[in-house]
Amino acid sequence: MAFKDARQFIETLERTGDLVRVKKEVDWDLEAAAISRRVMEKGGPATLFEKIKDYPKGFRILGGMVATRRRLAASLGLPPETSVKDIYAKYEHGEQNPIKPKTVKSGPCKENVIAGDAVDLHSLPAPYIHDGDGGRYIGTWDCVISKDLDTDWTNWGMYRFMILNKNYLSGYPNRASQLWLMFSGKYIPKNKPMPVAIAIGLDPICHIVATAGFPPGASEVDYAGGLRGEPVELVKCETSNLLVPANAEIVIEGEILPDMVAPEAPFGEYPGYRTEAIKLGLVCKVKAITYRNDPILTMISLGMPVDDSSMAASLTAALALKHRLQRHGIPVTEVYNPPHSVTHLLVVGVKSGGRKVAQQILDVLIARRVAINKIVVVDDDVDVFNMGEVLHAFATKCHPIRGTLIGESKPGLGNPVTPGLSPEERRALQSPVAVYDCTWPLEWSKETDIPMKASFDMAYPEDLKQKVIANWKEYGLK
């Protein structure tokens, strides 16, 4: 089923016991984010804060929209108890069947329109998320929409934006991000401001797609339609020709200025650490704000996993890299990006392994920038979604010397928020990549060299296994 908006998804989460309405007044200044952070670290429900200090009745903040596997499954219309493998399969099917969006004349996001001198970003309950942050961040769990200057390509991405004053924001998109490449490559050379729209409080799929690493030129809204099973309804902005989701809770319309910078950060980012000091970021002049009656501001209190970012990126990054490897002819079965790894570790299952295949995987993945710096390669008898099996394979099958392959550290290929990199490496986007080959060497004989796995699937006759499975409940087991 497709959720038409965030509110319909909230109703579903409430029915499944995956949401709590916090009716006690909470402060936008750290308290709401602190509550949400602790809930996520305990694997608790999404939190809808219904009474925000200093703000009118009806203004709300939602934290942890898809911060658990149960809620990620629900976002795809699956039962909350769906396995990780089946969640990945459903996402992959939807991604491979995109559906074009539908433009409508108006929508709920237009119920209130504030423009020009009346714009005041402080009229929205933007949270102060971490003690020591550079300011109040209104753009965390958002969807930032921009358009290429010379083509029809419209990009959706998730980028952070901090309030500077009543009508200016500052942001610091990754220098390898599509927003930055679009702005620096097209708008800055022509000294033109770039129109942007920051959409907040969308249906969960639209937010998840905004986190995905689709290639330049790809239309994220089409993929969102495929995942939803029906078109995303879009409506034109008040101050530009950008199209935004009609059912958004809040839309901030503005333009990024080509000739201005402003302080941005610090901010506790998705790897679970604050690695950045104050820096000069992009400046966005806000020209209009539109919002629904009783708006819900979606927030992510970023930090130690698992949270919305690591859960969504776990799904989107893994499948993007799976398709990249398959395009290069590598015999990939499944790819998993565990949420706790915050996109820094990848598990790749292959039909047949060995050092040559491991080297091919390394070569493909370091040819273009990825956040991954550790890759574990396993045979197809290991369930890549079962971290117990993966850890067992790493501990028992990866040779400490010949099983470790290191990719050269190259500028531009690293991740600027990887905590283990030095400040110099982070600034240069420079990081080595390690592959851990946990597969049997191809030259080993199955009869004499490869040990037999002592598991239920491998160590018993097929007829006995079927008997045990058939009599399972009679044994008194569940």
Image: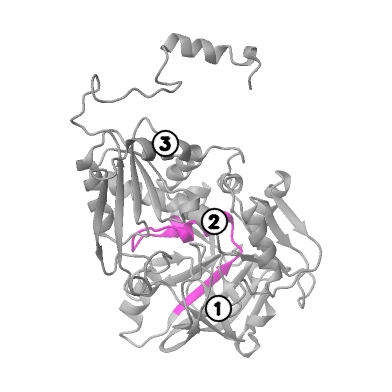
Of labels 3 and 2, the one closer to you: 3
Residue to which mark 3 is pinned: 392
- Regarding residue 5, the answer to whether it shows in the image is no
| Residue type highlighted by circle 1 | Met
Instruction: Tell me the residue at 27%/69% (across/down).
Output: 411
3D distance between C-alphas at marks 3 and 2: 22 Å
Where residue 271 appears, as percent x and y from the top left, is 48, 62
Residues rendered magenta in the picture: 195-222
Mark 3 / mark 1, whichever is N-terminal:
1
Q: Using the image as rendered, state which of residue 425 and residue 368 is in the foreground.
A: 425
**Horizontal side of residue 399 vs 472, given as left or right:** left
Which element is circle 2 on? loop
Residue for badge 2: 305
Q: Which residue position holds label 1?
A: 162
Image point 33% across, 47% down: which residue?
A: 323
Element under disc 3: helix
Dividing the picture into quadrants, the one containing residue 119 is bottom right
